[in-house]
Image (cartoon, helix red, strand yellow):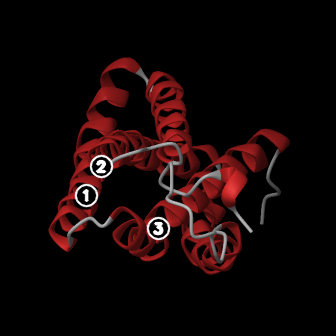
Amino acid sequence: MEKLSARQRLLVAVVMLTMASETLDIAVPGIVYPRLIQEWGIPIAAVTVSVTAAGLAMAVGSAVGGPIADRFGRRPVILVGVPLYGATTILMGFATSIEMFTGLRLLAGLGLGAVMPVLLASVAEGVPSGRRGAMVRSGGKVCPARCSSFTSCLVPRKYSNSPPSTAFGSVTNMT
């Protein structure tokens, strides 16, 4: 079996990190929304709209990411999609309303959805044929289990009784 070059290992690592990001994104509803319902007093219908919008945005991003990459190349899709996902995910922590949070989840879903198939195609083409299947599948098996545990450690367990100022509470009020 052929060894992977440094460039091929980097490519696989980037894909696995992106898959880890997707796993973290999928964990958001189970971890963050219950806190938003409790602290912001939002109805479950608003949460349903937010979760649905993010999932649909990811599907749309996946559907358009490939054709855009075919026309303009993979690099532009990656260079737009990854920062879009990253920046909007960070900004979610500073959201002050469910509408703002939903809008940011929508943009994050578009970016992540566009990037995932492009990166997986890059791995499929960029590694030796004997290792393709294993390289493409590896992130899907390893990342979700590891990232689920990691995600649960990132979210603070309790907040003070003061009202939240952002989606994740005020940093100065965490105890």
Look at 71% across and 74% down and name the residue there. 153
Q: Where residue 109 appears, x then y in whole percent?
A: 36, 48
Answer whether residue 107 is visible to the viewer in this image.
Answer: yes
Q: Does 47 appear above or below 109?
A: below
The residue carrying pointer 1 sits among few (fewer than 14), some (14 to 19) or many (20 or more) residues within 10 Å by Cα, namely: many
Label 2: which secondary element: helix
| Image quadrant in which the N terminus is located | bottom right
- Identify the mark at residue 24; answer none if there is no mark: none
Who is closer to the viewer here, 18 or 9? 18
- Identify the mark at residue 32; answer none if there is no mark: 3
Q: Where residue 130 appears, x then y in whole percent?
A: 64, 64
Label located before the other in sequence (2 or 3): 3
What amino acid is labelled 3 in the image?
A: Val
Label 3: which secondary element: loop
Look at 37% across and 29% down and name the residue there. 69
Q: Is residue 131 left or right of residue 103?
A: right
What amino acid is labelled 2 in the image?
A: Thr
Give the residue furthest to the front. 162
Label 1: which secondary element: helix
> Based on the displayed image, in which of its 4 quarters is residue 19 positioned?
bottom right
Q: CA distance from mark 3 to mark 1?
A: 12 Å
- Identify the mark at residue 102; answer none if there is no mark: 2
Q: Where residue 16 appears, x then y in whole percent?
A: 64, 58
* Residue at numbered disc 1: 50
Q: Does 58 appear above or below 26?
A: above
Q: CA distance from mark 2 to mark 3?
A: 12 Å
Q: Where residue 93 appears, x then y in whole percent?
A: 53, 48
Q: Is residue 39 left or right of residue 68?
A: right
Q: Are marks 2 and 1 in contact (CB under 8 Å)?
A: yes
Look at 46% across and 66% down and name the residue there. 28
Who is closer to the viewer here, 102 or 57? 102
What amino acid is labelled 1 in the image?
A: Ser
